[in-house]
Image (cartoon, coloured by chain):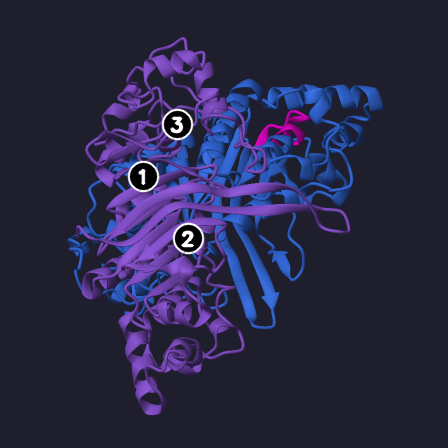
Amino acid sequence: MSTSLLSVRDLVKHFPITRGVFGRTAGHVRAVDGISFDVKSGETLGLVGESGCGKTTAGRAILRLIEPTSGQVTFDGTDVLALDAARLRALRRQMQIVFQDPFSSLNPRMTVGAIVREGLTIHRIAEGAAAQARVKQLLEEVGLRAEYASRYPHEFSGGQRQRIGIARALAVEPRFIVCDEPVSALDVSVQAQVINLLQDLQRDRGLTYLFIAHDLSVVEHIANRVAVMYLGHIVELASGEDLYAEPLMPYTQALLSAVPIPDPRKRKSRIVLTGDVPSPADPPPGCPFQPRCHHPAKDVACTRIRPPLEMKAEGHLVACIKQPPTRISWDEQRAAGATNAPDRYVPLALATPHS
Amino acid sequence: MTAPDPRPQALLTVRDLRTYFHTDAGIARAVDGVSFDVMPRETIGIVGESGCGKSVTSLSIMRLIRPPGVIEAGSRVELEGRNLLELPEHEMRRIRGNRVAMIFQEPMTSLNPVFTVGEQIAEVARVHANASRREAWDRAVEMLQLTGIPSPAERAKEYPHQLSGGMRQRVMIAMALMMNPSLLIADEPTTALDVTIQAQILELLQQIQERFAMSIILITHDLGVIAEMAQRVLVMYAGEIVERASVGDLFAHPHHPYTEGLLAAMPTLGAARTRLAVIPGTVPAPTRWPPGCRFHDRCPHAWERPEREHPPLFEVGPSHWSRCFLAEEPDRRRVITRSEDRVGETR
């Protein structure tokens, strides 16, 4: 559990904004703006955030489904971004993805069997009768009937299609799977089936997951550690227990307090953020969250200093210069115009988890 | 002479509502005998998964069902004593927007992209109150302000695509409030929004309900939203109400196995990370509701009787109703142990 299978350093993906007939570049959408994290072998790292925070782009850039602008991605010692096309294809056997939308991610003209078998053929894992047997085995492993192999995707419900997508990813026996919102399109009762399936498969096959989602309850349930993204940055990274028991980044605090709890006896006070998320084409200076921040010590220094993602407690990384301890010294903050010294802030409503 | 009914008059009474879709694949009984009341100033939640009939119920109340959908004879929807299903279309048009307003999941599809949001909101007052252009515009700006849109006078001149999803939903709410309706139907109003924006919109709905003394029918798949917003809850499954209770009773003592299953299947923030309970199988197609109890083939307690007989709603507590024979045969309820076996989607 302690060795990193995947290591991401300063990963950046900027999309150019083009204007006019000559496609002049008029600016950049900073979808992912320098993120670093490790995923340990056998763990699930949750990547959460709201629409446009860059979580999906991050997942795809790691697999090079879109080419990152800069940064480093190391998978089991291999420099992923340096690989040529042939070697990248070979590596994809070990790194797979399960997509959000089970309706658009399966080719409607292919049978379920052909969809699952494709990876076996491409990677020359099995052919003919052996491949057929393997497909049936995979379908049964994800809780589908073997005879579904001859049917087409439209004959299946959302939950069943997501199982087909999981079988397809498993076919090449990967070690690492990016799960990009795999249950968001599913109803609650079906969502639970798919979450349990992903957990069973992880246990049985020793899989490592990067689990991307906007639903904090789902991520808390499935992830060992959680990274919170906001406007292209990771703003907090901690074990699930620490993050939910004591969120330190004011954004995480607001995010957690906004989740409706399905228990009418536990109505809680809530931090309601004002305004919308700024555009990633024109991010605010300094801390990306500063225009909406509710930390009592927030001041002008927050608009001038980009907060580093730094250790606040064992294994608990936070990007906030007002949550002590911080390596941005008070002198440095004052030089940037600070008037409020860093002061630990954990709103009372959040200090005790809803037990 | 009967004694006068001491209970307050319901604002909306729905009785035996049946909305069927007559398709080539057969008759889809999307809403199949739904009855409930909405009291003045209350929020009633309708919860259920895709295809349970919750949205068709709300569209039927508004009479927005198009062929092949038909609101079947014998259905009754009474608003303030008038049966809406018998009104001529021009009178129904006066009710919509005036007495009953509706907001939807995706505000972008309900707004016209070629008019400014101010014009679209003002249009409501021009149609329903014959207001002058000036009056209507001023009221539109006032409503935008009330929904918490910053610099409303400027925002009113913008087009829908210039606004974020949360802002568009505020515009829809402003439009709904223009004529001071007595009932607001909110169909998954926050489902397309991020959780921090959802919190803003739910808070706004609570404020305007207070201010306008409205009733709200809140339709959602999210039990968390129900717990925070509703006083009473209807749980729908396969075109029927399967449980009806106060929000406190429903979450503390769910009676119907489907409600129980839904609550157990939800991962909850701060809860222990035990394996999630699952409801096996999937919702049946509305053209082929199972005979007997429509949930029996997914139910952990099912025995012969629910396979054959269709259960009515039983009163299982004060104002607490459940469509399950366990009300009569409580000993049939089994203790559910969460199986560690791999759960397939088939049983």
| Cβ atoms under marks 3 and 2 closer than 8 Å | no
Magenta residue check for B178: yes
Position above or below: A328 against B69: above
Give the residue type that dot 1 points to.
Answer: Leu
Q: Residues within 10 Å of mark 1 (few under 14, many from 20)?
A: many
| Kind of residue at badge 2 | Gly
Chain with blue colouring: B
Closer to us: B204 or B323 = B204
Query: Where is mark 3, residue-wise?
Result: A307
Q: Is label 3 in a helix, a strand or a loop? A: loop
Q: Which mark is on residue B250? A: 1
Tell me whether the residue at label 2 lies in contact with that at label 1, contact meaning CB atoms closer than 8 angstroms.
Answer: no
Q: Which residue is mark 2?
A: A59
Does B32 sit left or right of B112 as displayed? left
Tell me where residue B131 appears, x and y as whole percent.
81, 23
Of circles 3 and 1, which is in front?
Answer: 3
Find out whether residue B333 is within the magenta segment: no
Of badges 3 and 2, nearer the viewer stands: 3
Residue B215 is left or right of residue B139, and the answer is left
Q: Please give the chain letter of the residue carrying mark 3.
A: A
In this rendering, the answer to whether A236 lies above or below B136 is below
Q: Amino acid at mark 3?
A: Pro
Circle 3 packing at 10 Å, graded few (<14), some (14-19), many (20+), is: many
- Quick one: SS at disc 1? helix
The reply to whether residue B152 is in sight is yes
Q: Which chain is purple?
A: A
The verdict on a common chain for dots 3 and 2 is yes
Looking at the rendering, the stretch of residues picked out in magenta corresponds to: B173-183
